[in-house]
Image: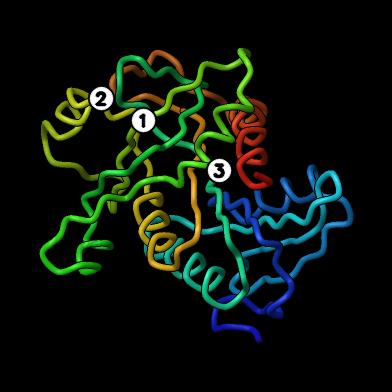
Amino acid sequence: MPTAHINAESTDFAPAVLMPGDPKRAQRIAEQLLDSPKKVTDVRGMLGFTGTYQGQPLSVMGSGMGQPSIGIYANELYKFFGVQRIIRVGTCGGISADVHVGDIVLAAGAHTDSNFNQARIPGIYFSAIASANLLIAAAAAHTNETPLHIGTIVSRDHFYASTPGQNEGLADYGVLGVEMETAALYGIAAQYHTEALTVLTVSDHLFDDTYEMTASERESTFQGALKLAVAAALV
């Protein structure tokens, strides 16, 4: 049955869902990748599609921005629609000096300044980590066209605000990049004993503003990350 935020039937989603933040990007991915994509949800403009890719069922759905937003959709997909794997595919700002604009990041784990996961296990600081088999599958699909980094990222609640010196501290600890969703996604996947992975394209860099991708470059570079996300989805 439809939920408050997804107006699909219980069998409308494939076991694996690719999840960009932008619902319009979800539509473009569905039209690009899927055979006979069918729109299965559009509540509040958050578009979701299901079709097949190389004969296997696959869904694509937007998440919106931030941990509360992806938290709503991931919860409902895992709990009510039989989804087993969600692969977030999006962008991040680079933090590590080893990361450059256009590189691909596989988020093995996600630090956060959010309280989203704090109440999960009283007295425990929950570790938000990727599903190992999805991480391995995505890494194995990588070719040498675009540099790949595997490590930790940070999921922030605030896009514009940060504590002075915090980003420098994260860089000192080898954090690769910053975005706004992954820690919540990994926590929810653990809650439901399901799987999740985040695959990111570095769209800008917090400590190096010499180059930022244009909108068209961002779309074309995004294809390398999408290939790894599909490999993880169909593992």
- Quarter of the view holding residue 8: bottom right
The residue sitting at 77% across, 66% down in the picture is 39
Q: Where in the figure is residue 107, as x and y percent of width and height?
A: 41, 37
Tell me which numbered mark, 3 or 2, is placed earlier along the sequence: 3
Whether residues under marks 1 and 2 lie with C-beta atoms below 8 angstroms apart, the answer is yes
According to the image, what is the colour scheme of the structure?
rainbow
Percent across and percent down for residue 110 are 32, 43
Front position among marks 3 and 1: 1
Task: Give the labeled residue for mark 2.
Answer: 174
- Which element type, helix, strand or loop, lies under badge 2? loop
Badge 3 element: strand
In the displayed orientation, state which residue is furthest to the bottom. 1
Residue at the disc numbered 1: 151
Of the numbered discs in the image, which one, if any, rests on residue 36? Answer: none
Q: Mark on residue 89?
A: 3
Label 3 close to label 2 by CB (< 8 Å): no
Q: Amino acid at mark 2?
A: Gly
Q: Is residue 99 left or right of residue 44?
A: left
Q: Amino acid at mark 1?
A: Gly
Q: Is residue 4 above or below residue 55?
A: below
